[in-house]
Amino acid sequence: MQFLLAFIVVGPLVGAVAALLPAPPGLKGKSPGQAVLRHGVTVTGAILLAAIVLALGFDRDHPSKMQATTDIKWIPTLNVRIHLGIDGISLPLLVLTALLTFLCALYSYFKMPSGPSPKAFVALLLVLESGTLATFAVLDLLLFFLAFEMVLIPMYFLIARWGGDQRQAAAWKFILYTLLGSVVMLLGLLLIGLKTGTFDMVALATDNGRGMTTSVQVIAVLAIGIGLAVKTPMWPLHSWLPDAHTAAPTVGSVLLAGVLLKMGTYGFVRIVLPIAPEGMHRFAPYLAAFAVAGIIYGSLACLALAKRGSKGDLKRLIAYSSVGHMGFVLLGIASMTPTGVNGALFANIAHGLITGLLFFLVGALKDRYGTADLDTLSGATGAALYGRAPRLGGLLAFAAVASLGLPGLAGFWGEMLSMFGAFDPADGLSRPAFLTFVAIAAVGTLLTAAYLLVVVRRVCMGTPGEQPQEPRLVDVQGYEVASWSPLVALTVLAGLWPAVLLGLTDPAVHKLLAGGKS
């Protein structure tokens, strides 16, 4: 188990180096480009297989216990250690990252985005995977920061070199926002380490803030929270996200929404809640207020983009929908209750599956139509996907209703549990205030359903009164079925059997909130 976890974290880095080397003559295939894309599929497939084996070997009877741990001295003078481990909170995110990266590599093998050499593309994809996996596996604050930062450079280049229109501006906005937030976060992490004498996240969670005064905790939560809120992203620190998604290639959008946004909310659960509980208690009402503001803002922005004649971009619409969905995650965390935090973690996974699928589908639509403009997709040249590409239209409708939280699909449980947690928040938090937040969030669910159903009606059903005579589109192809089917299946599985996730997260969340005591 120790070897598997270390291999999962380090393996993609080794694969990235190998991708930049010349391919052996017998493995070149039809071209060097094809060989390196096949290499990407092979490496990410091996990491996914290792993650599945790790999950199968995970002791589900004790999900609150750190497993597959490695603890090695690294910088003794600072008491920084190479400390790895997983529990019921981090394991689902680890598997989700490995799955989405493999599906992106598989999709790219058949549909490589236009841009420079495939070698650089595959190497950046693998570095991005390694950084993300490390973020969910490390148990040292400084290692967490390094892993957190490691993903920024590859994502910057994926957007800037393989993106669409306005890619340079979007890439710069992404890197500047996230770097600024990270600098502030580092100050908070260093403050905790200097005041407690350790950067070990397990020891700090067990101490449960007793080694820091309330004022130190407040300052640390403010600094760390700003950095995490930018990555989440929380309104009003979200403005980099729509531009980045709109400009990014399809696989970049899938990984950005499906994996990178989870790093911010994971940091709130793994670091802020257990290590500085008193500071978090002070800021919880404000975090909840920003969360519900994001829910409403994201939904209204999506409604404006979905309106006829607005020239709204479908990728941009889904990006704004992520602001709303992550608002539910933050609301659950702000409740500081086991129910709310479990809901937040469930919503994290559900969002990764569903929004990853949505970006895959929008990328396929853009490839077929040459645009993601909603007015074009629903106009005379592109109406009625049900009639022109029925499988593609059906998948888009499925992803939309999953995203709006239809009972029986994964999106339902996370939002419901987050609101249940906020309905009865932790002791000391104002219940009237949180009841107000729940009421506002409930309005957000209605707005979410409204804009997603508008999108389905306009794109899949066509515009009433129009009868476009365009030929049928190419429907879902084999490689698309292979790339999208796991996301569909897991969305249904998590919706019908939520205990698959909640059985892992619930004991770990209770232990985390209780200061390391099961």
Image: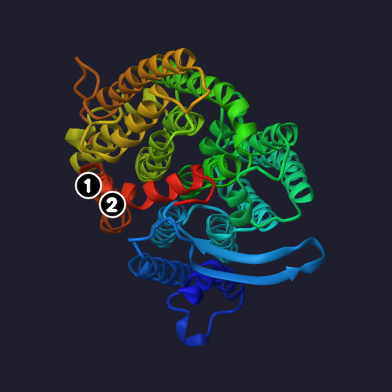
Label 2 to label 1: alpha-carbon separation: 6 Å
The image shows residue 330, relative to residue 443, as above or below, that is below
Q: Which residue is mark 1?
A: 497
Amino acid type, residue under disc 2 in the picture: Val
Spot occupied by residue 453 in the image (x, y as percentages of width and height): 28, 23
Protein image colouring? rainbow
| The label number, if any, that marks residue 500 in the structure image | 2
Secondary structure of the residue carrying numbered label 1? loop
Q: Nearer the viewer, residue 367 or 76?
A: 76
- Label 2: how many Cα within 10 Å (few below 14, some 14–19, many 20+): few
Spot occupied by residue 277 in the image (x, y as percentages of width and height): 60, 37
Amino acid type, residue under disc 1 in the picture: Trp
Q: Is residue 166 visible?
A: no
C-beta proximity under 8 Å, tags 2 and 1: yes
Q: Is residue 468 visible?
A: yes
User: Is residue 418 left or right of 199 when viewed as pictured?
Assistant: left
Q: Nearer the viewer, residue 150 or 36?
A: 150
Looking at the rendering, which quadrant does residue 405 occupy? Answer: top left
